[in-house]
Image: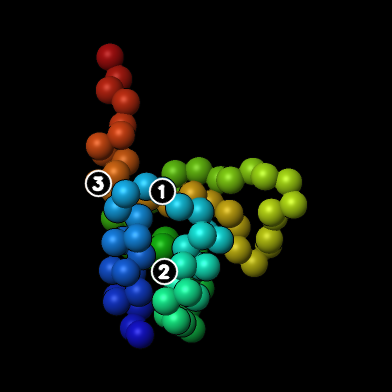
C-alpha cells in the first residue's frame, strides 16, 4: 500500500478520537497494512494530522515508537477551547 493510502486510512481511524502511536501501529498491523516508512514519519508528513501530546505511562516507553498522541486537524478544531 502506498503512503497516501496509508495516511488516508489513518485519518479515518483518527476521526472519532485521538490515538497514540502504538495504537495506530497495532491497528495497521491488524489490517495487514505494511509500509517501508515509519509511522511517525507518515503522521508528521501530513499537515492535517496533529501531534497533540505524549502518553506517559511507565513501562510503555519505546525509543523506536515514541508514544505520541495524534488527532486529525478537524478533531482538534472541534475540541479546541475558546480563548477569551
- Report the residue at 36% width, 65% height from top: 10
Residue 63 occupies quadrant? bottom right
* Residue depth check, mark 1 versus mark 2: number of the one nearer the observer: 1
Residue 58 picture location, percent across and down = 73, 46
Residue 61 picture location, percent across and down = 69, 55
| Residue of label 3 | 74
Whether residue 72 is visible = no
For marks 1 and 2, give the CA distance. 16 Å
* Residue depth check, mark 1 versus mark 3: number of the one nearer the observer: 1
Quadrant of the frame with the C terminus: top left
Whether residue 59 is visible = yes
Secondary structure under the numbered disc 3 in the rendered image? helix
Residue 71 picture location, percent across and down = 37, 50
For marks 1 and 3, give the CA distance. 11 Å
Mark 1 vs 2: CB contact within 8 A: no
| Residue of label 1 | 18
| Residue of label 2 | 42
Residue 75 picture location, percent across and down = 29, 44
Q: How is the image coloured?
A: rainbow
| Label 1 Cα crowd, 10 Å radius (few <14 / some 14-19 / many 20+) | many
Nearest the viewer among 13 and 5 is: 13
Secondary structure under the numbered disc 2 in the rendered image? helix
**For the image shown, how many numbered marks are present on the structure?**
3
Quadrant of the frame with the N terminus: bottom left
In the picture, measured across the screen, residue 74 lies left or right of residue 14, that is left
* Residue depth check, mark 2 versus mark 3: number of the one nearer the observer: 3
> Closer to the N terminus: mark 1 or mark 2?
1
Is 83 placed above or below 64 here? above
For marks 2 and 3, give the CA distance. 18 Å
Nearest the viewer among 48 and 24 is: 24
Mark 2 vs 3: CB contact within 8 A: no
Amino acid at each position: 500500500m502506498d503512503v497516501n493510502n496509508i495516511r488516508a486510512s489513518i485519518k479515518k481511524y483518527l476521526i472519532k478520537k485521538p490515538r497514540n502511536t502504538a495504537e495506530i501501529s497495532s491497528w495497521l498491523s491488524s489490517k495487514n497494512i505494511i509500509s517501508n516508512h515509519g509511522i511517525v514519519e507518515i503522521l508528521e508528513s501530513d499537515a492535517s494530522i496533529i501531534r497533540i501530546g505524549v502518553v506517559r505511562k511507565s513501562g510503555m516507553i519505546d525509543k523506536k515508537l515514541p508514544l505520541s498522541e495524534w488527532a486529525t486537524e478537524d478533531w482538534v478544531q472541534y475540541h479546541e477551547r475558546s480563548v477569551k
